[in-house]
Amino acid sequence: MAARLRRGPPAPWLLGSGLACMRNEQVIVRDINFTLHRGSAVVLTGPNASGKSSFLRLLCGFIKPSAGRLFWDGNDLSQAGLYDLYRPQVHLIAAKDAIKKAMTVYENVHFWEVLEGGEGRTQWALDKMGLGTIAQEKAVVLSMGQRKRLQLARMLAVPRPLWLLDEPSVGLDTEGVEILEDLMDEHRRKGGMVFVATHVPIKLHDAMHLMFPPRVPQLRQYNAGDYA
Ligand SMILES: Nc1ncnc2c1ncn2[C@@H]1O[C@H](COP(=O)(O)OP(=O)(O)OP(=O)(O)O)[C@@H](O)[C@H]1O
């Protein structure tokens, strides 16, 4: 009889092992380990400047780890070409929202959807975020909370398994936060994953918690005339 391989538990979808991140020639985060399985979530907290946003950018592939490894579905992302396959699996909601003020609310989502090869989810995503009735307004008139809702609508319009959310509730009213929490739950129920950096408590059941310590920046040497 042919031998059968015994199947172990599924490999994590994303695994970080001993990760470190540098900014401005300084190591700002070191020795970070985590696993993300389908349907799971990580909540990342830490004081200002402890490196949360930078770490999300590292997870997104914008910054290379200065140490450690990131594995996607069992593959080491440092292998040539793998980031190009991984990157379209990830959404990053960052402080800079890249909203085009001269475009309508609808166009801001639709151009992104079309760019990503999708069609037909824009109005649904706007409705979901409570922006459906102002779809034809220019984005320049949006309030801060509405801009955040628009950012989230963009994310919904292009389905991707991993959501990296940097302070996603900033600017949102109570209703907006509830929508966000429901969206994260729904995403996870469908097998999606959420990695959220936040200063304010957010409802995310059974999440793993990561806390970055305060960071004491090393003083840089400045020469006379640097400020001239
Ligand atoms: N583009 C950049 N170039 C160089 N250094 C940067 C850059 N962005 C951030 N840093 C530095 O990296 C460190 C960590 O910043 P980061 O924004 O990742 O922290 P954070 O934990 O997200 O902070 P906050 O809670 O204030 O949002 C800071 O010392 C910051 O000065």
Image (cartoon, rainbow, N blue to C red):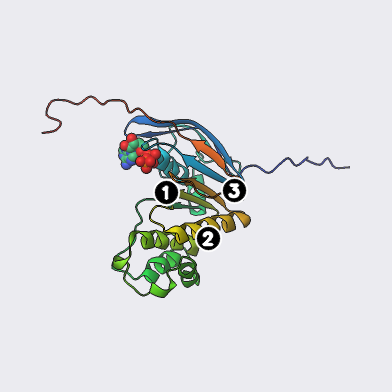
Work out how far the residue at label 3 is from the one at label 2, CA to CA, in angstroms: 22 Å
Q: Disc 1 and disc 3: Cα gap in Å?
A: 18 Å
Which comes sooner in the sequence, label 1 or label 3?
1
Q: Earlier in the sequence, mark 1 or mark 2?
A: 2
Q: Going by the picture, which residue comes out furthest to the front?
A: 174
123 relative to 146 in the view: left or right: right
Mark 3 is surrounded, within 10 Å at the Cα level, by few (under 14), some (14 to 19) or many (20 or more) other residues, namely few
Does 189 sit left or right of 194 as displayed?
right
Which picture quadrant has residue 220? top left
Residue at numbered disc 2: 159
- In this figure, which residue is indicated by the disc labeled 3? 205
Where residue 35 sits: x, y (%)? 58, 40
Question: Which amino acid, mark 1?
Answer: Glu
Q: Residues within 10 Å of mark 1 (few under 14, many from 20)?
A: many
Q: Secondary structure at mark 1?
A: loop
Q: Quadrant of residue 24 in the image?
A: top left
Q: Amino acid at mark 2?
A: Pro
Residue 213 seen in the figure: yes
Q: Is residue 122 above or below residue 32?
A: below
| Distance from mark 1 CB to nearest ligand 1 atom below 8 Å | yes
Instruction: Indicate the quadrant containing the C terminus: top left, top right, bottom left or bottom right.
Output: top left
Q: Is residue 199 left or right of residue 223?
A: right
Nearest-to-viewer mark from 1 and 3: 3
Q: Amino acid at mark 3?
A: His
The image shows residue 39 at horizontal and vertical percentages of 61, 50
Report x, y in % for residue 172. 41, 57
Q: Judge depth for marks 1 and 2 and give the one in front.
A: 1
Q: Residue at x 41, y 66 (%)?
A: 109
Q: Which residue is mark 1?
A: 167
Residue 181, horizontal then vertical, whole percent: 52, 55
